[in-house]
Image (tube, rainbow, N blue to C red):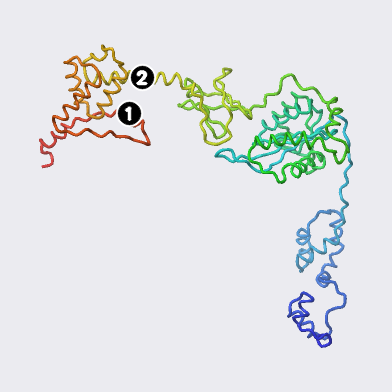
Amino acid sequence: MRTVDKQSISAIARQLRLHRDTVRRALGSESGPPVNEPRGRMAACKLDQYFRYISDRLKEFPNLTASKILLEIRKQGYQGGYTVLKEYVRELRPASAPAAFLRIETQPGEFAQVDWANIGSVTIGNARRQLSCFVMVLSYSRMMYLEFTLSQRAEDFMAAHVNAFRYFGGVPKHINYDNLKTVVLSRVGAEIRFHPRFMDFAGYYLFKPVPCGVRKANEKGKVESGIKYVRSAFLAGRVVSSHAQVQSEAERWLAEECNTRIHGTTRERPTDRLETDRAALMPQPANEYDCAITASARATSQAIVHFDSNRYTVPFGFAGRTLTIKAWPRRVVIYSGARLLASHVRCYEKYRVIEDPRHYAGLLAQRRKAQMSLLVESFLALSPERGLAASELSLQGQLDKIMTMAGQYGKDEVNLAVVRALKHHAYGAHFIQNIILQQRAARNMPAPQPVVLTKKPQWTKLAVEETDMALYDQLFEDNIYE
């Protein structure tokens, strides 16, 4: 063969995509390879004796895997490999016909379909929040409602329903769902255990939840197509910078594009068919269902409650009490029983303190009174004289200055200056300071430098008990180290 074609072993190997050693062995063989012998046929011949067994097993159990059959025929003496068996089983397995679905058109107002999907995340301040899109489609008109949420909690799911009912102008009689945990807690065969709060919500609006069969997305194909349409026609090529931005753009897209296009199936605009749908929808209740997140929390000693990785203040008088938190997408409200204590704008960042200054107003007044009382007591402890209190000067301001001098120059020096000032009926902090400076100048003592704690300025106001240095002199006089 090589002599006739005048080709090298390497050239033949490249053309046939074989290894050079394989070509060399074939050229060295007198008989050559079998003519028209299918690749792997020799190995498959080992399986012919198991043909009837494998065929019968596949007829009885069409989904039986090749690995399971391998274990069974090895017990009967099969010594071959798994790969050739897998090819053999593929040829013998009965061909399954593609699933066929009956296209069903529903009556106006009868059905809607709901789903939501993860579409990424969005940055809010110092936090990264998951972004999801909720889609409801009226089955008859194909009218779509779209809303973006920052979580997939049951409360957000129900709130999106309420917004959709308001958008459509009524409530459909049945709503199809996938097996979402917010709707279906568990199912065993035909037995379905629904989420109790969602069933309470459905009962309030009088619609019937209809879960799809397991792995039967075709039963809610309209909303599945709707999700795909949102991804391709709205989200594709769009940069989502904030939750508010994407929701605003979605509302405009629904009104100007999505619901005004000619639908591919009905060949009509969803907005035109909505009038027929709306006439058959059930009316909405006079009051909307309360979809708030409800939780209990104990206020800290600083009158703060924790919710969703943030902290919210309450009036200081409720510190240490167990309170009720109710949260909506835009508000966080805190109650003590039926009494409203606080209402805050909901924060979607993390580890923030959301304060209302009014919650601490009474506490600050109490603290100022307490500080004033302590200041007066400290001053009276500094000197028994009360002439300053009898003067027309501002008692608190003068006391502040005098106590500051006590921290700078020491209690004894300020006390001596106070006594001298009172002898001359000189009432006021400036008189006391002049006396102190004169006393220090007479002793050639420099003015002390004030201590400023830039990172903790409040520490400069701490009261520290002054130590009598004469105790150390006494130690040396007693020669205790001898």
Q: Quarter of the image holding residue 395?
A: top left
In front of the other: 260 or 189? 260
The residue indicated by pointer 1 is: 461
Residue visible at 27% across and 21% down? 378
Give the percent coordinates (x, y) of residue 106.
87, 33
Whether tag 1 and tag 2 are in contact, CB under 8 A, the answer is no
Residue at the spot 86% in from the left edge and 29% down from the top edge: 108
Q: For the view shown, which residue lies furthest in the bottom direction?
A: 3
Residue depicted at 51% across the width and 31% down the height:
353
What x and y, as percent, mark residue 112?
Answer: 80, 33
Task: Specify the label residue 478 is tagged with.
Answer: none
Which class describes the residues within 10 Å of circle 2: few (<14), some (14-19), or many (20+)? few
Give the position of the N terminus as an image quadrant.
Answer: bottom right
Q: Which-is-in-front pick, marks 1 and 2?
A: 1
| Element at label 2 | helix
Q: Quadrant of residue 408?
A: top left
Determine the CA span between mark 1 and mark 2: 14 Å
Q: x, y percentage for residue 15?
A: 79, 76
Which secondary structure lies at badge 1? helix
Q: Amino acid at mark 1?
A: Lys
Disc 1 packing (10 Å; few <14; some 14–19; many ≥20): few
Front residue of this view, candidates 319 and 411: 411
Q: Which tag, 1 or 2, sits closer to the chain's start?
A: 2
Q: Quadrant of residue 29?
A: bottom right
The quarter of the image holding the C terminus is top left
Q: Disc 2 marks which amino acid?
A: Ala
Left of 129 or right of it: where is 200? right
For disc 2, the marked residue is: 370
Q: Residue at x 48, y 27 (%)?
A: 300
- Note whether 47 is above or below 346 in the view shown: below
